[in-house]
């Protein structure tokens, strides 16, 4: 019966979680918190290059608009960036971006329910690092 209740509540949970993400996390304050978090962790750039690129799906859009998808070429290319804004993008281009999402979906009456021994594992993520001068971002 608990499983049936869980399954029937999935649609409601999804809209509720989307609303929480939109109204509580899509704010200038949360964006500033992310900048501060990644600014204080320069070691995450090396973590992205040495660990995450091999595990997840990455693509890089270079400043001249070319797209790189080969993992070794991406690692080599990203190693050449030392300026702060590009470095910040590289530091944040890993699964640490999922932490706030995990917090929103985990709880006794939410999607990931610890009391049911449920866990959440990312076995696939795609990161697009756009380094175009006026459009730097991670998708």
Image: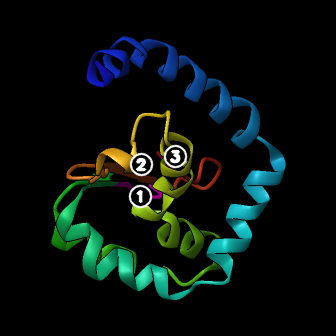
Residue 61 in the magenta stretch? The answer is: yes
The answer to whether 132 appears left or right of 127 in the picture is: right
Which residue range is magenta in the image? 60-65
Q: Secondary structure at mark 3?
A: helix
Alpha-carbon distance for marks 2 and 1? 5 Å
Dot label at residue 62: 1
- Asked if labels 2 and 3 touch by Cβ distance under 8 angstroms, the answer is no
| Residue position for label 2 | 65
Residue drawn 67% across the image and 83% down it: 40
- What x and y, as percent, mark residue 65? 42, 48
Say whether disc 3 or disc 1 marks the residue closer to the N-terminus.
1
Q: Is residue 133 left or right of residue 33?
A: left
Circle 3 residue:
101
Quick one: label 3 or label 2, which is nearer the N terminus?
Answer: 2
**Residue 68 higher or lower than 107, as above or below:** below
**Which one is closest to the eye, mark 3 or mark 2?**
3
- Dots 2 and 1: beta carbons under 8 Å? yes
Q: Which secondary structure, mark 1?
A: loop
């Amino acid at each position: 019966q608990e499983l049936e209740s869980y399954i029937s509540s999935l649609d409601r949970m999804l809209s509720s979680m989307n609303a929480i993400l939109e109204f509580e996390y899509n704010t200038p304050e949360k964006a500033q918190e992310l900048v501060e978090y990644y600014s204080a962790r320069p070691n995450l750039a090396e973590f992205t290059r040495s660990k995450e690129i091999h595990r997840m799906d990455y693509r890089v859009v270079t400043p001249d608009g070319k797209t790189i998808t080969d993992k070794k070429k991406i690692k080599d290319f990203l190693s050449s960036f030392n300026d702060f804004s590009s470095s910040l993008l590289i530091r944040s281009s890993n699964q640490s971006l999922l932490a706030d999402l995990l917090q929103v979906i985990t709880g006794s009456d939410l999607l990931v329910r610890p009391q049911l021994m449920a866990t959440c594992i990312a076995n696939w993520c795609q990161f697009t690092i756009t380094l175009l001068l006026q459009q730097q971002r991670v998708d």
